[in-house]
Image (spheres, rainbow, N blue to C red):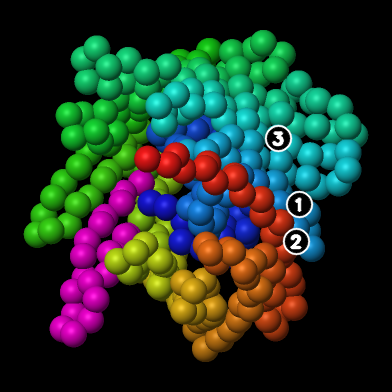
């Protein structure tokens, strides 16, 4: 599911690569291609430099809108660069290069190489190598005739792990269950909530497990254009044998479909954040400055666009 606001994405900018490899280390995740829409960018954006009070991120896109390069800069000499290569909208290669004190660190730099086989259904093979030419992991992602991920097979020097993805439908609800070597790791239940005189909402409930035991859960409610309206976070209490609500986060948007308010409720505590924007004045209405109140933190974006190709006269 695509991101709904770059303001929310910013909270994860410096964690994105870590999350990618953590997920792989646990039970695997199918290859993902990122587009302008994932970063709340509209129109034919070529580059976007994001400047915050904690660092810089620069995104580069191809004309089709796919992310081709991401630079995360912590200082002038410490930065990470991710490269993405595609063929017919399929991700073929991803490279993460870490630079420390201005020099490439081959110990932590990684290459992910993808190959696609459609002989019998669709299988995507991902091979992961370090920049020291060390083989780290191989993943095989198998899809069914509905183009749904049904199996992830991981192999490395330590052995083989297999994750099966099981789909169940009941009364309009669809549940995906991830089982690693027969042990439940995660479940995702998607349903449509309808109330009289209100727009339908997509409700996504994600439950995470540790060694087959419930750990935590998150329920998100999204509107018809994919904007996150409400998120409820739960922790599993062993003594009670059930999930207990920990906090509720509500999101509100302005007429430009940008996040305007974020309200976090945890017990009797209520925290409210407001978001103020300056737009670039272009036809697409991308924002170039965001201020978060009352924190008074800021983000600015410098955006360049591909030049429009001249139309041929008939």
Majority secondary structure of magenta residues: strand
Total numbered labels placed on residues in the image = 3
Quadrant of image for the C terminus: top left
Residue corresponding to mark 1: 56
**307 left or right, relative to 106:** left
Q: Secondary structure at mark 2?
A: strand
Q: Tell me if residue 212 comes above or below residue 299 in the rendering.
A: above
Q: Tell me if residue 190 comes above or below residue 276 in the rendering.
A: above
* Residue 226 placement: quadrant: bottom left
Q: Tell me if residue 242 comes above or below residue 170 in the rendering.
A: below
Q: Where does residue 48 sit, x and y in percent of width and height?
A: 66, 51
Residue corresponding to mark 2: 52
Between discs 3 and 1, the one toward the N terminus: 1
Q: Secondary structure at mark 3?
A: strand
**40 left or right, relative to 47:** left
Q: Secondary structure at mark 1?
A: strand
């Amino acid at each position: 599911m695509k991101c709904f606001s770059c303001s929310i994405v910013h909270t994860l900018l410096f964690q994105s690569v870590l999350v990618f490899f953590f997920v792989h280390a646990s039970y695997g995740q199918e290859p993902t291609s990122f587009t302008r829409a994932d970063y709340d960018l509209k129109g034919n954006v070529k580059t976007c430099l994001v400047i915050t009070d904690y660092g810089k991120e620069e995104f580069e896109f191809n004309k089709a809108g796919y992310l081709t390069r991401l630079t995360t800069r912590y200082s002038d000499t410490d930065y990470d660069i991710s490269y993405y290569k595609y063929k017919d909208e399929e991700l073929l290669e991803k490279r993460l290069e870490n630079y420390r004190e201005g020099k490439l660190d081959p110990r932590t730099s990684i290459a992910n190489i993808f190959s696609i086989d459609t002989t019998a259904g669709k299988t995507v093979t991902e091979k992961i190598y370090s920049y020291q030419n060390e083989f780290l992991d191989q993943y095989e992602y198998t899809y069914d005739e509905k183009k749904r991920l049904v199996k992830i097979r991981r192999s490395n020097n330590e052995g083989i792990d297999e994750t099966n993805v099981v789909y169940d439908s009941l009364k309009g609800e669809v549940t995906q269950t991830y089982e690693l070597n027969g042990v439940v790791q995660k479940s995702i239940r998607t349903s449509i909530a309808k109330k009289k005189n209100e727009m339908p909402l997509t409700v996504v409930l994600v439950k995470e497990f540790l060694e087959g035991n419930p750990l935590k859960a998150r329920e998100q409610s999204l509107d018809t254009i994919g904007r996150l309206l409400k998120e409820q976070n739960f922790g599993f209490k062993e003594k009670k044998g059930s999930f207990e609500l920990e906090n509720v986060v509500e999101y509100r948007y302005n007429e430009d479909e940008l996040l305007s308010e974020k309200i976090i409720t945890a017990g009797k505590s209520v925290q409210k954040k407001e978001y103020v924007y300056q737009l670039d004045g272009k036809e697409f209405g991308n924002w170039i400055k965001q201020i978060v109140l009352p924190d008074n933190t800021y983000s600015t974006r410098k955006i360049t666009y591909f030049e429009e190709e001249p139309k041929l006269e008939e």
